Image (tube, rainbow, N blue to C red):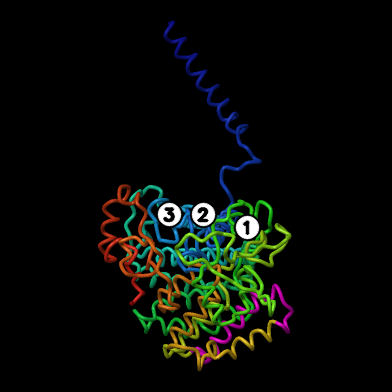
Amino acid sequence: MKKIYLILIALMGAVIFSSCNDTLEEMNVDTKHPTEVPGPYLFSNAQKALADQIASTNVNINNWKLWSQYWTETTYTDEANYDVVTRNIASNVFRIYYRDILKDLKEARELIAAEEVLTDEDTKAQQNTLHIIDLLSAFTYQRLVDIFGNVPYSEALDIENYSPKYDDASTIYKDLISKVKEAVEGLDDGYGSLGSADLYFGGDVAMWKKFGYSLLVKLAINLSDVDQALAKQTIEASYDKVFDKGEVCKLDYLGGINANPLYQDLIQSGRHDFVAANTIVDVMNNLNDPRRAAYFTPVEYDSVTGDPIYLGGEYGHSSPYEQFSHIPASDDPGNSDVNIADAKFPMVIMDHTEMAFYLAEAAERGFSVGKTAEEWYNEGITESMKFWLGRHFDPATVAQMTADYLANPDVAYTTAPGDWKQKIGTQAWIAYYYRGFVAFTSYRRLDYPEMNTPPSPPQDLGNLPVPLRMTYPIDEQTLNKDHYYEAAEAIGGDYLKTPIFWDKQ
């Protein structure tokens, strides 16, 4: 009998505990701090992480402004000499792109796709949002391929798979083109999307369509030397729908805790780690380029003419901060967006300047793109002048400066030295200033301008002045060993001198 009583007591206790437990679970729900972040917030976070990574000059995560030889280092010159091992930079880059950007985009897509929609208008907005996420994901994957070569793609972002395979870079490119086409064709600018959660366009679907067509041109131009048919077809179908004059995809920083990372790195930190590199300063000095006033601070002024004098540090060598031109900042830090190191200076993701130079190149390759190479070349320079000098001078002055520059025999398309690759490559590189990775990619494709060789390059660079890729993260050799070695063998060796598949030397 005693056993029966104990069993009954136990059963009653279980029922009571179960009822109390349900009540406690309900009480323990924190309605003010949800455990699941809404999809649009994740999208915003991914946009911010992408812009920050592109903008930053923190040597632990972004060396492209050095590799494009816009800037050089003052004291610690390892990164300007392409040391990617000491700080394990590649691992940090991998983490940011996969965890902070692509993972958030993937989760945002899953959450938004699972939302119940009640009206046709909501359905259209939902579909637009999903297509926009796909476009930004494709943009991010292209950067990963252009950084490393073969990368995890088809098996990436699976939390259950700790060792994803590396997909063939060329195959990824073709799949990205297909996905971008599908996304662009699916966008309906008669309906909304993400609204204020979209930090780049404020939910403007028409601008995202232009972003998609611009991305197709960006992808295709890199394929010009390896798959001309696909490149030609893609560019000719897209060129007239890309960003137009003055149009840009960018993140406008707010200052304060949401300041441009360049302000945080160059001003707020109190450190003096970078000066202008002689590579770009010498070229711009020889061309009397008026954008120097926006790009650099003068070291002194000519005693006779009063003209500013700009001087760059020898690339890769220790360059004392006090002796060379700096990256300018406003006298009103935190409130101005006039100079590159200002807290509110925007970070450009993609714009018409970039498109104009791509289309100049496409015209030289025989693609039908509506204008001549010279016209697109002039347009690229003009748009760059407006972006940079328009912050410092009135429109009439900027127009005159631009006309004078284009009339310079060393700039004018018909008389500038070298073949079309040298002309376009040099001017595109100048125009892309502060977008180091875009400039680095343009250099790899066109082999111009001529770069300086630093004093202590690593052995796996060979005889090249600049690397052709970032080597894979060191920890991939242990955490994803088999697939790492497969990928390294497939691309021709995990070296700085190994070209990306589209880079035909």
Looking at the rendering, which quadrant does residue 492 occupy?
bottom left
Q: Is residue 131 left or right of residue 166?
A: right
Instruction: Check the picture and name the quadrant holding the N terminus.
Output: top left
Q: Earlier in the sequence, mark 2 or mark 3?
A: 3
In three-dimensional space, the C-alpha distance between marks 1 and 3, rounded to whole angstroms, equals 21 Å
Which label lies toward us, 1 or 2?
1
Give neighbour class at mark 1: few <14, some 14-19, many 20+ (Cα, 10 Å): many
Q: Which residue is mark 3?
A: 89
Instruction: Check the picture and name the quadrant holding the C terminus.
Output: bottom left
Residue 426: x percent and y percent?
49, 80
Q: Which residue is mark 1?
A: 263
Which amino acid does the dot numbered 2 rest on? Asp
**Residue 36 versus residue 6: which sits nearer the camera?**
36
Residue at screen point 60% across, 43% down: 34
**Residue 129 versus residue 299: which sits nearer the camera?**
299
Looking at the rendering, which quadrant does residue 7 occupy?
top left
Residue at screen point 67% across, 61% down: 344
Residue at screen point 58% across, 48% down: 37
**Residue 18 versus residue 346: which sits nearer the camera?**
346
Mark 3 element type:
helix
Q: Is residue 75 visible?
A: yes
Q: Is residue 121 visible?
A: no
Residue at screen point 52% across, 18% down: 13
Which amino acid does the dot numbered 3 rest on? Ile
Residue range in magenta is: 369-397
Q: Which residue is mark 2?
A: 104
In three-dimensional space, the C-alpha distance between marks 1 and 2, rounded to whole angstroms, equals 26 Å
